Amino acid sequence: MSETLSARAPTFYDEVVAETNGLGGELKTCIQCGTCGGSCPSGPDMDHTPRGIFAMIDAGHKEDVLKSNTPWYCVSCYYCVVRCPQDIHITDIMYALKRLAIKAGYYQETAQDKAPEFSETFIGFVENNGRSFELGLATRYHLRYHPLDAFKMATGMGLKMFTKGRMDILPPKIKNISQLKSILNKAKELGGAA
Amino acid sequence: MKFSYYPGCSLERNARSYHQSTMAIAEPLGLEFDEVEDWNCCGATEYFAINKIPAYALVSRNLALAAGQNGSRELVAPCSACYINLKKTDHALAESPELRSKIDQALEAGDLAYQPGSLNVQHLLETIVKEVGYEAVEEQVTKPLYNLRVAPYYGCMVPRPSAMESFDDPEHPMSMDKLFETLGAIVVDFPLKAQCCGGHMTQISEETALEMIRRLLKNADDYGADMIATVCPMCQLNMDAYQDAVNQHFGTDYNIPVVYFTQLIGLAFGISPKELGFGSELISADAALAKVTEEPPKEKRRRRVKKNAGLPMPVMPEEG
């Protein structure tokens, strides 16, 4: 990615920058000021603050970075992005780290963290129907990973949502699902395996 | 004024009252909404976490359909996540030729095409305050929301659509504050109005999510809000449906209804609560709405500034 680094093998840093689609390329200008972590609403529950993660990326600690819960605890609120004095697109870098973690398969070793499965279950419905499906998401994801929560959902809040007419029983579906599937299949082919 | 309209999955069901109230206020506001035919999900905050090119392709199908419907250049989304995904994708396609060439090929597989920049993506709040304007809103007010104390909640993605330019201040947005004043309501100070509601964290780490929701409820309660008004289905769902869980977890007893800003506009326009979808919130808004009076509040809540006392300072709420 970087013109000065082209002579040697790509480092983990290069890998991260490449994955951000040019949107996170200013990462090298991080001055380690910590404004990102200080602005982060879920920062206290992260293994490492974004600032720490950026230092680790720079130092090539690939495994520690990709096993960290930090990107998965990013709520995508963009506070850090608007406050970063170096205009680094931190949220997009967090999305890139999530994708790299899935690609590397590291997240499977961190049992407490089921965030990737949540995203994948959500997207499964979208890929097949063109629409998201809350009930299906809640039951499929919870029964698999948090059976007790699924029970809580079904008897408490889920039931209330039903009675208020706020949950579909059957998955909604778009008309031209074959068109969407062709587009997504082609996109997957072009995007590589990830 | 004619606008393409992208409701998004939430407005089809869980946030139906947002859709109903939007449709109900469209005519008095002079807005004509043309729903994008056969639109698909925007991927929320999930698809970009898994697979980049398909995530952009998913959103691009919507852009292509909206642009091909030869209605309007303006595409309106009421949901914060849909808004940011549509806007971000249009922006990214214009910025990155490499991405664009891949998305062009993907769309072609479905006989579609999209020229970046051919749409102007806006959030519904933006449409109402910028395109319609406060004066035109005020003209339609027949039942002012006198004495109703509202906490305007913007959440994260509307004031901060990534690094792209926002129509309001990214940290101290004021557009909804002004809008509710126009409707006659008392707009309370709400320092956390642009903080995140936690998004999907209720599903990933409930403790993290409940703490984020608790902060918002406490803040609105501290400043004496009768209700919270929001611009996003995710924010409404988190603060409304998880309010019980917050109370259980922290031993609190919050009972703050969370409604959509369009529902309040509709009420002030004299539209019936039923038509605006009131009643579908889990924390009932009835008690709060009963506070609305026909006469404006007698006392103007304007604090006198003593001479030579410097600038007025914000007032801290009393700790409960």
Image (tube, coloured by chain):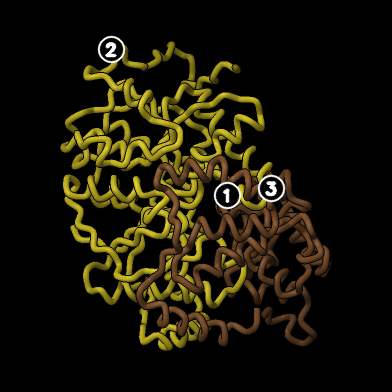
Give the residue displayed 68% in from the left and 52% down from the top. Answer: A147
Report x, y in % for residue B230. Answer: 42, 41
Q: Which amino acid, mark 1?
A: Tyr
Distance between the Cα atoms at labels 1 and 2?
39 Å
Q: Quadrant of residue A170?
A: bottom left
On screen, residue A89 versus residue B194, left or right, reads right
Q: Which amino acid, mark 3?
A: Leu
Residue that label 1 marks: A79
Q: Colour of chain B?
A: yellow
| The C terminus of chain B - image quarter | top right
In this view, B215 is above or below A62? above
Residue that label 3 marks: A148
In this view, the mark in front (3 or 2): 3
Contact flag, marks 1 and 2 (Cβ < 8 Å): no
Q: Which amino acid, mark 2?
A: Lys
Disc 2 on helix, strand or loop? loop
Report x, y in % for residue B269. Answer: 20, 36
Q: How many marks?
A: 3
Chain to which the residue tagged by mark 1 belongs:
A
Determine crowd level at label 3: few under 14, some 14-19, many 20+ residues with C-alpha closer than 10 A. Answer: few
Contact flag, marks 3 and 1 (Cβ < 8 Å): no
Give the residue displayed 40% in from the left and 49% down from the top. Answer: B15
Chain to which the residue tagged by mark 3 belongs:
A
Give the residue displayed 79% in from the left and 63% down from the top. Answer: A67
Residue that label 2 marks: B298
Disc 1 on helix, strand or loop? helix
The chain assigned the colour brown in the figure is A
Q: Quadrant of residue A104?
A: bottom right
Distance between the Cα atoms at labels 3 and 2?
53 Å
In this view, the mark in front (3 or 1): 3
Q: Quadrant of residue A140?
A: bottom right
Chain to which the residue tagged by mark 2 belongs:
B
